[in-house]
Amino acid sequence: MERTARAFKENVKEALQQENLAGVLDIMSKFSPIGRNIAIGKLPEFEALRDDARDIKNHVLANLDFYLEEYEAKVIESGGHVHWCETHEEARQKILEICRSVDAKLVTKGKSMITEEMHLNAFLEDNGIIPVETDMGEYIVQLADEPPSHIIGPAIHKTKDEVTELFFKHHKTQRWTEGEDLMLEGRKILREKYFEADVGITGANFLIAESGTSVIVTNEGNGDLTQSLPKVHIVCASLEKVIPSFEDFSQFIRLLPRSATGQEISVYTTFSTGPKRATDPDGPEDYHVVLLDAGRSKLLGTQYQEVLRCIRCAACLNHCPVYTAVGGHAYGATYQGPIGAALDPVIVGLDEARHLPNASSFCGRCEAVCPVRIPIPKILRYWRAEAFESKSQPLKERAGLSLWTWFATRPKLYRLLAGAGVAVLAKAGGAKGHLKRFPFLSGWTNHRELPAPEGKTFQALYKKAQKEKGRVSP
Ligand code: SF4
């Protein structure tokens, strides 16, 4: 996938023109929160579980070396291999080496963001190996030659009609128009690939240190076929996926599906520990874990560390007013939405991803729904400050920010000008209370009307409310 995070502003303009995308995102933004709310409403201990999950992750991050070494020892004990890879290139080369060791021509892949991060498909193709995505959403975007647009719903931006045309073009069978027919056709084609594949590659939602087990949480069952039918199973995971025990896993599994899809439990939760044993009826003969760092260990002990708690549930995307307006492709990097804005600067560098931390209204919904309580707005503020300090923004932006600082640190002047600005906007909004056009606000008004303020600043309204309650405002 070509990186276009640097062109975020242009990507956004393009995304906002796409009517199909707007429709899909509109539905998603309405229904995802409802599903999550229903699911968590049935679990009174949900908030306590979030605290536990945060604490477990913090404990692991404080003792990451210990748990990773414990995990590695257990994988080896169960007959598997662990490959420590500092960079994407090292991980790609290691995967290629394993594939070549069995003369692999075709590999099946379960859903894995980490392999997206390392652009594994293109690399394998360049080296004469055909990768086949088996998660239906991933399969669709692979056929479309597009990157995923959502962490757990890779093809969420595609309409049914688009999938019809895509399948017809590639499968050359019937032009199916019903969702069920499309699914059945995709399923039939993928079934054959599982048997042809020499290697199966999956990601891991969790790595359990006490047993050397990798866990995938899925809804389609494709991950199970990917990892159990080929001769070799390669697990690709980043360092922070490790957790101490099954007991800890039982906490996370109550949070993940509820936060991700509003399900009480996903359809499949699959545990893999080493290769097939003599008494097992099936399973891979060889089991490898590619453990990728790619900049994560540098975050330990820094103000960015908390981002490593992420369990990739995508709740922050589903609730984000920016993501649900522009979709995932606009971000132009592996991870989208609020977690993308917080994590992509680590993966591709702040210079490349410098616009992403600005893709936030700071409404705080991402933090409010995050099952591991990652303070994403705070992390985005750190990135913004670092971008400013490193002078990576264009001079015009830096000058604007300096001017704003000057203005915002003079309360009397700020109140005076903000009050005048609000009065002008209120007048321009007229009886409708909306602005269709306004100088300097075209970034907003080109795509939607701007609600006009009611004529008073927030500070004035707050002061009035405090007075009515008989309190003295600061
Ligand atoms: S940051 Fe939190 S809400 Fe967003 S994907 Fe990660 S765990 Fe889920």
Image: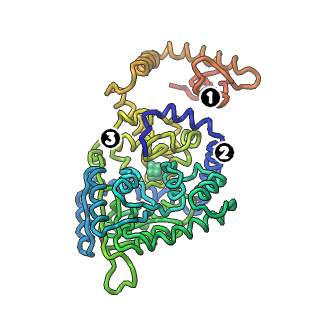
- The front one of 98 and 295 is 98
- Does 383 sit above or below residue 413? below
Q: CA distance from mark 3 to mark 1?
A: 36 Å
The kind of residue tagged 2 is Gly
- Judge whether 72 appears above or below 439 on screen: below
Residue 407 spot, x, y in % from top left: 46, 16
Q: What separation in Å lies between label 3 and label 2 (alpha carbons)?
A: 37 Å
Q: Which residue is mark 2?
A: 23
The mark closer to the camera, 3 or 2, is 2
Q: Residue furthest right?
A: 431
At which x and y percent is residue 296? 30, 48
Q: What is the secondary structure assignment of the residue under circle 1?
A: helix
Viewer-side label of 3, 1: 3
**Residue bearing mark 3:** 303
The amino acid at mark 1 is Ala
Task: Tell me which residue sits at (48%, 55%) in the image.
Answer: 313
